[in-house]
Amino acid sequence: MVAASTPEGKSTRVRRIGILTSGGDAPGMNAAIRSVVRTATPLGIDVVGYIDGYVGLVSGSHRELDDRAVGNILQRGGTVIGTSRCPEFYDAEVRALAADRMRSDEIEALVVIGGDGSFRGASEFTREHRIAVAGIPGTIDNDVWGTEETLGFDSAVNTAMLAIDNLRDTSESTGTNFFVEVMGRTSGAIALYTGLAAGATGVLIPEVENDLEGLASRLQRALQRGKRSHIIVVAEGDEAGGAFGVANRVAALVDIPFRVTVLGHVQRGGSPSARDRIIGVESGALAVRCLAEGGGGVMVGMRNRQAVLVPLEEVVAHAHPEPELNKLRLAIEVAG
């Protein structure tokens, strides 16, 4: 058993920790769940998984997770304990009920895998009820402050890139130009990295004002020199109304045959990439070690490809990270 200390400084022993996945699912969540269990078990710590995120935490719905329960899940997408969105958890009375259920079940600490919304609830929860919480950023949007990489982002970019590679074959064969919409809510990270990796002619993200006239001019020049294939990547939160809005406005400026493809939730599913598996393993292990040593109120972020602890209160105090404009400029300079 591992000796630890509470936020009040009293010696205690961590015997049971809970884990939940919250918000949208992301490839790599199962890798993190497995790592939490496999790290906790040799330390004599039991792990329970809350079913469907904060909904399970509030209702007390959970199941025991031992080594056998997490066998053969590393390569699986989604989350084996389920996830959901639970706006009720922003209510202080609901959080108090969840804390009471944890104590009655003798669950002393909590690992939360999710995005910035999940962490806002977790930050309030640990502040109000002195329950140690360690967060792991799991969202394909890569829009959590304090980490350079979130679980699922690399997999989502690879999925979108491979889809565009397939579309390019049709584009090249038929001379049809494709406007491809990728996910990301208000973050353009997936669009930016996908566009750069796929050699897109244009990348439009919500954080930067659109230059549709400039895009139309680049398309026109490329058409004049005989180029047949163009891919324009558009973030779903783009101000012009997503890929359909961009396509119609660009078509009004330059005469091009086009189609719109919305990749949608296919970016969330599928087997996680090697990078997302590694992030999940490293993050889960550090989260358990932190809680076992009496820590809490932290998020496990990735900086310079290393797992680090970041105070949750700092994470929720910031908006999502600014886009990497150097990559946007590079994408335009080497546009396909």
Image (cartoon, helix red, strand yellow):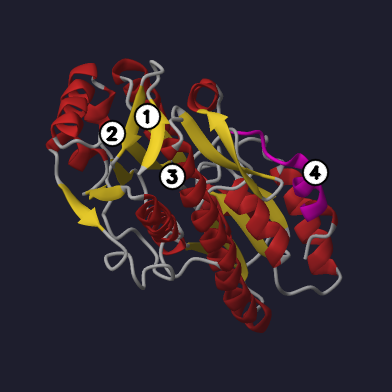
Q: Disc 1, disc 3: CB below 8 Å?
A: no
Q: Disc 4, disc 1: CB below 8 Å?
A: no
Asked whether residue 152 is drawn in magenta, I would say no
Residue underneath mark 1: 132
- The disc, 3 or 4, on the residue closer to the chain's N-terminal end is 3
Residue underneath mark 3: 288
Q: Disc 3, disc 2: CB below 8 Å?
A: no
- The disc, 2 or 1, on the residue closer to the chain's N-terminal end is 2
- The disc, 2 or 4, on the residue closer to the chain's N-terminal end is 2
Q: Is residue 61 above or below residue 166?
A: above
Residue underneath mark 2: 108
Q: Residue at x 67, y 36 (%)?
A: 208
Q: Residue 58 sits in which quadrant?
A: top left
Residue underneath mark 4: 326
Between the residue at mark 3 and the residue at mark 4, the CA separation in whole angstroms equals 36 Å
- The disc, 3 or 2, on the residue closer to the chain's N-terminal end is 2
